[in-house]
Image (spheres, rainbow, N blue to C red):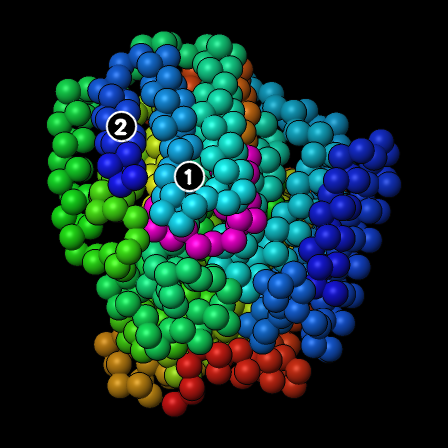
Amino acid sequence: MNSWIDADLVLITLTSLVLLGASRLGTSIRMVALQGILLSPLPLLLAGQSGFGPRAAMLAVATVLIKGLGFPWLMARAVRGGSQRREMDPRIGYNASLLAGVLLMVVAFLLSSRLPLPPGEGTPLVLPAALFNILAGMFVIASRRQAITQVLGYLVMENGIYVFGVGIASHQPLLVELGILLDVFAAVFVMGIVIFHMGRELDHTDTDRMTLLNDWEKE
Amino acid sequence: MIGTLIIVPALAGALSFGLRSNRARRALLVATAATHAALAVAAWRGSPEPTLYDWLALDDLGRLFLGLTSLLFLVTAVYAVGYLAREKGRTAGDRGEDFLFRNIPEAVFTGCLLLFLSAMTLVITSRHLGLLWAGVEATTLASAPLIHFHRHRRSLEATWKYLVLCSLGIAVALLGSFFLSVALRETSSSSSLVLDDLLRRAPAADVPWLRAAFICLLVGYGTKMGLAPLHNWLPDAHSEAPSVVSALLSGALLNCAFLAILRVLQVCLAAGQGEFAREMLLWFGLFSMATAAVFLVRQPDYKRLLAYSSVEHMGILAVGVGLGGLGNYGALLHAVSHSLTKGMLFLVAGNILTAYQTKAAGEVRGLLRGLPASGILWTAGFLAIAGSPPFGTFLSEFTIVRAALGLGRPVVAGAMLLLLGVIFAGMSRTMLAMAHGEAATKHPAEPFLAVAPPVVLAALVLLLGLFIPPPLETTLRLAARALGVPS
């Protein structure tokens, strides 16, 4: 069972790495979709040792629906609705981003060696994989200019937290987990609306060109 | 009881999306605010039963913040009626800009305002840290459309910044909540995030995980609270949002995020990690005050000025709690007086903006002559927010400085006094210059609904400085005790 979990975690990590080096929005959205689908068996696999109940199954289904299908559909729609360029123009180049990704992985492993896992929880890969996805998501948010890519980064970060949630802190009541999934869903939905407005009113969704609000260049 | 407090504004919010008539909607807004306030008073006097598996309950801290939020919402709702009537159908251009903007429909505005109240009530009453998290996230989502009220490109930019930064923060807070459940797991099969369970299990906490959890939660909710260097969304959102919303963001929302941090602090205290947590709060607080001081001096935009002043005051709250002892009491008192003062100032800023059509402080002159009511309130508000006697803010800031001296932290006290002095000087230059001088144009007399709400808040701040009503005093003492035994 554990080897399946680890294989899944490695695949999830790889999708994040591909996302870091992806130059096209379409590829990035597909990677996030793939990541969502890869996440869904985790609750089942992790509950595997003690036999999974309806709770883990529901969570898995909700994950596929929301993270695997819902978000990518919303994002793809926002790309079509807005008028942004398909090619992205990041603050940090794709190769440099990939290199940063490798560094972030080292950081994730170092951090997880500082936090000893309680015995009998998850596998040793859960914590570094979760931390890496969180860091990679933050990196994408910070290093990309397009609003839509920043949302994708946010999703990757959420996925990392999800890995941690189901992998280690897996004893929360279901209600909370579903609430959290729905909350994230709503957040992405609201962001999608804002991106739509941006496309219409500013003719671009480039956050670097949003420089009307600042403290220094007034008057 | 507690359920009703959350459900009533949520239902009213949903209803407001469906109502056709603007008059009916405004009546609904005020009626809901009044109902919420009445329920809050009842909850304050009685001790309402916990509901939903004890996930929702009202302790002394919750009682304090519930009363404050409800009061502020009621006052701003009354103000909003006049504001919406003035804004109705206005297609305004910016001064010196060829750009027209149209406000979002009133139905969306009122609906989101009420949902925002519901979400804040959820944050205040929730005893389950997962539910608390969901509540904080809900406040972000409900308030984002409010910031986008003017549908201007600047408000869009502010909304985007607000959404991205607060979502990032909230994601880190979620991670922190998970860390907390790892740090405090009882057995491998159960690990609830209900505050009472956490407090009970805290003495056996896993220290590295607990510390990591506190850092994540402080950074996460600190983003929402506006602690520097995580405050970047705050000046933009506060300056671009309509004044009614700015008043609520500053007066109520920041407090909710502060309460979330206090909940985590309670867990750290029970785990014997109070020292570590308090020290971090203290430095975050001082850093926020210093950052605010830098941006407050020569700030050309008076709404941004008020926003940076919020960063400063959130810093003071963090310093107060970071000191502990008497500082706890001072911080809670300061949360009350800051909310009332800042709510009042933003409402007055709304009046000034309506009359002068500019946010540039340099173009506003002669408030005392041109807009006498707002001019007097603006001057009084300046004195209050800068912490001069006899206002409530003076009393609370004085209490915190005294706490620092009493606890043998003269450096903290000195730094605080220095920063407060710089901020006083910086704000007085801008705000007093606006009040004095010749009025360039004659303005019509201000409507009653634009003046009465800030007057009520100003009166309350003044009252707090002279005499703290006994029920409030009792609640403050009890709430401060929840944050550690007073020394």
- Does residue B226 show up? no
Chief secondary structure of the magenta span?
A: helix
Q: Which residues are magenta?
A: A166-188
| Residue at 13% across, 36% down | A103
| Secondary structure under the numbered disc 1 in the rendered image | helix
Q: In front of the other: label 2 or label 1?
A: 1
Q: Residue at x 32, y 70 (%)?
A: B205
Q: Return the x and y of residue B257 as percentages of the image width and height.
A: 48, 57
Q: Residue at position x 66%, y 69% from top?
A: B50
Task: Give how far across and how far down residue B231 sits, in percent.
Answer: 38, 49
Give the residue furthest to the bottom: B487
Frontmost residue, A133 versus B315: A133
Q: Nearer the viewer, residue A108 or B438?
A: A108
In the figure, is residue B118 to the left or right of A87? Answer: right
Q: Amino acid at mark 1?
A: Leu
Task: Provide the residue designation for mark 1.
Answer: A44
Looking at the image, residue A162 sits to the left or right of residue B58; the answer is left
Residue B286 position, x and y percent, is: 30, 64
Picture coordinates of residue A167 (x, y %)?
Answer: 35, 46
Which residue does the numbered mark 2 point to in the structure image?
A11
